[in-house]
Amino acid sequence: MTKDLNFTYLVRNSVYINLTNRCPCSCTFCLRNNADGVFGSGSLWLEHEPTVEEVCQSLDSWKLDQYDEVVFCGYGEPTVRLDALLKIAQYIRSKSNVKIRINTNGLTDLIWKEKTASKLQGLVDVVSISLNASNKEKYLELTRSKFGINSYDAMLQFAQDCVKYVPKVVMTIVDVVTSPEEQKECEKICRERGITLRIRPYEP
Ligand code: SF4
């Protein structure tokens, strides 16, 4: 495994931020199982977790207004570093009108042992949360979350809370690990909560 200092990288026309390699899950379909990076990003395995200053410096090398979004994603769960994420989002807001998105497993409240969705208000435009499955058992089977069987309900509650504080909330499932019946169930779960479901292709 090679490592370098890839704190920001380009995916299609968006700038991605790689804050951490830590994650409370170990998903069966995680891209980290297959490769060191995505879309020519170079290795996303970090030598060290970047400081807020290092990420802001890295962001300064991009003309942010030219891109569709800045996305907190990377090779780990970005909300493991929620405080840093919020400071960096503030920095982006201070210098650009670019949209800010978080891709998250939605387990933030379990990670921090408190309600967290309200902290995103005014700083984040889109939250994309991995729904993964239509029930807690399947979810745990797929994600192998260290928080166990309570993870699914906590993730759904976080998603519901986000609807109050973030302009756009999307939930995602991966096509190859969900059956058509499962996908219908997931659509229903999202519809009931006023959330858009995105069935995303598996990108090995
Ligand atoms: S939550 Fe994301 S980063 Fe974490 S193991 Fe699952 S797919 Fe990988």
Image (cartoon, rainbow, N blue to C red):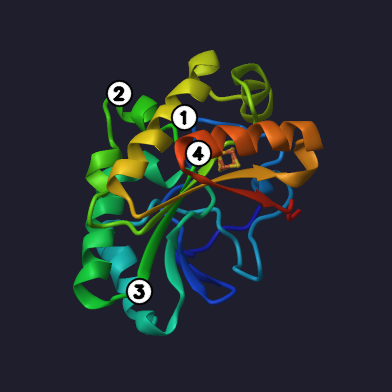
Q: Is mark 4 within 8 Å of ligand 1?
A: yes
Q: Report helix, strand or loop for mark 3.
A: loop
At horizontal 80% and vertical 37% (from top left) the residue drawn is 180
Q: Report helix, strand or loop for mark 2.
A: loop
Q: Is residue 14 above or below residue 85?
A: below
Q: CA distance from mark 2 to mark 1?
A: 15 Å
Q: CA distance from mark 3 to mark 4?
A: 23 Å
Tag 1: amino acid = Leu
Q: Which residue is mark 3?
A: 98
Q: Which residue is mark 4?
A: 105
Q: Quadrant of residue 63?
A: bottom left
At horizontal 61% and vertical 67% (from top left) the residue drawn is 42
Q: CA distance from mark 3 to mark 1?
A: 27 Å
* Nearer the observer, 97 or 166: 166
Q: Which residue is mark 2?
A: 113
Foreground mark, 1 or 4? 1
Tag 4: amino acid = Asn
- Residue 31: image x %, image y %? 67, 48
Tag 3: amino acid = Val
Label disc, if present, on residue 95 of the rendered structure = none
Report crowding for label 4: few under 14, some 14 to 19, many 20 or more residues within 10 A (C-alpha). many
- Residue 124: image x %, image y %? 32, 56
Label disc, if present, on residue 156 of the rendered structure = 1
Report crowding for label 1: few under 14, some 14 to 19, many 20 or more residues within 10 A (C-alpha). many
Left/right of residue 89 with respect to residue 159 in the rendered view: left
Q: Is residue 204 above or below residue 179?
A: below
